[in-house]
Image (spheres, grey):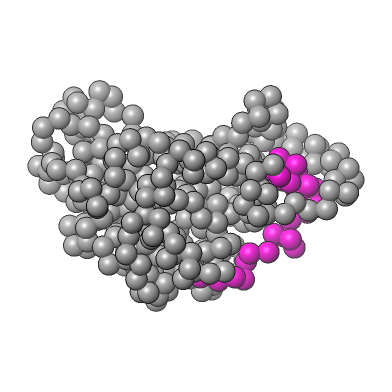
Amino acid sequence: MKIVEENKGPLFITGSWRAGTTLISRIMKNHSEVDVTYDSVHFMRFSYNQYNPISDGKNVRTLILNTKDRLEKRYNLGFSVEDVLDDLSGTITYASVYDAIMTNFLLKKSDKKVWGEKTNLAWSKIPDFLQMFPHGRVIHIIRDPRAVLASWKNFTHAPGNDYLDSIVNCYDSMQKALEYKKLYTNKRYTYVTYEELVKDPHGTTENICKNLDLEFYEMMLDTDGFTDNYGEQWRANSVYQSQLSGISLDVIDKWKSKLEDWEIVLSDIITESVMVRFQYRADDVFKRENYIDTALKEVQKSTLTSEGMVRFLFSGKGFERYPSDPLDETTW
């Protein structure tokens, strides 16, 4: 199968949970030439490097079958396994299998030219994606870590204080964004903050398209055209409002009233060094000492969070992880 043409490089969208990845994916899906998944295939999470050697025909078939089975089981969606296999020829690689699956799952239905995939917590896979697809493109979305924390706290099913682990995830996402910006040219990688996207959707989206060598169309911002996996109109899944316009400023500063002071202090201490690079301002430093003891006690209530904080303290590095294993079917 011929891998996507130079000027039709596939698109990968990622960021932390609750950062706005779905919003930007719906905007990009409104593009006349781009079709983007809605939380479905997740090749880089479930398949990449999981079926080695990928040159083995049995492994290829197993990968494709497992992808189809997962889509049917979780979302009642699917594609033709035989059609995907028919599209593969010559040397089989993860890139060729990925391209064949996405082409059959998305492009043959929409008749668009560029496929895109949105997968949360996959910024560590960005270098792999760009190596697989030399002309691939990436949108990495960043959001104020306190806003992520407040939203994730109310959204996750993780027990107790495991939600605090999102703080170090946000640190890593921001740190990697700064590294990738230096490593990749504008035509391959761009990061954007959720706040600038909702404050200036036109200018921000136009700039994204320019950076990724895509034409900008006004219809990309038509929220009536935002759809989900089943072609139904998409509504933002805010934890604060049951009905929220597709692009809204309403939730930007909700964290200020939803988080306790010790949560804000903890987040600021961990992320402040990278937060300022994205024009986020830390809270009043003078009140930190009043809440450090409380923050320490709350962190220790979660084995996951305390392990992560100690790991961060010793290594100075963030990480990208879920509170439970996404490969474990029982956690779906």
Residue 295 percent location from the top left of the image: 80, 41
Between 7 and 127, the residue placed more toward the observer is 7
Task: Please give the range of residues in magenta.
Answer: 247-272
Q: Quadrant of residue 218?
A: bottom left
Q: Quadrant of residue 194?
A: bottom right
Between 289 and 43, the residue placed more toward the observer is 289
Residue 21 percent location from the top left of the image: 47, 55
Magenta stretch: includes residue 33: no
Left or right of 200 on screen, residue 262: right
Q: Does residue 153 show up?
A: no
| 314 w.r.t. 36: above or below | above
Question: Which is the main secondary structure of the residues drawn in magenta?
Answer: helix
Residue 298 percent location from the top left of the image: 77, 40
The residue positioned 58% from the left and 54% from the top of the image is 143
Magenta stretch: includes residue 270: yes
Left or right of 176 on screen, residue 146: right
The residue positioned 37% from the left and 47% from the top of the image is 188
Number of callouts: 0
Left or right of 246 on screen, residue 265: right
- For the C terminus, which image quadrant? top left
- For the N terminus, which image quadrant? top left
The residue positioned 81% from the left and 37% from the top of the image is 297
Residue 314 percent location from the top left of the image: 69, 24
The residue positioned 33% from the left and 35% from the top of the image is 131
Q: Does residue 162 show up?
A: yes
Left or right of 115 on screen, residue 160: right
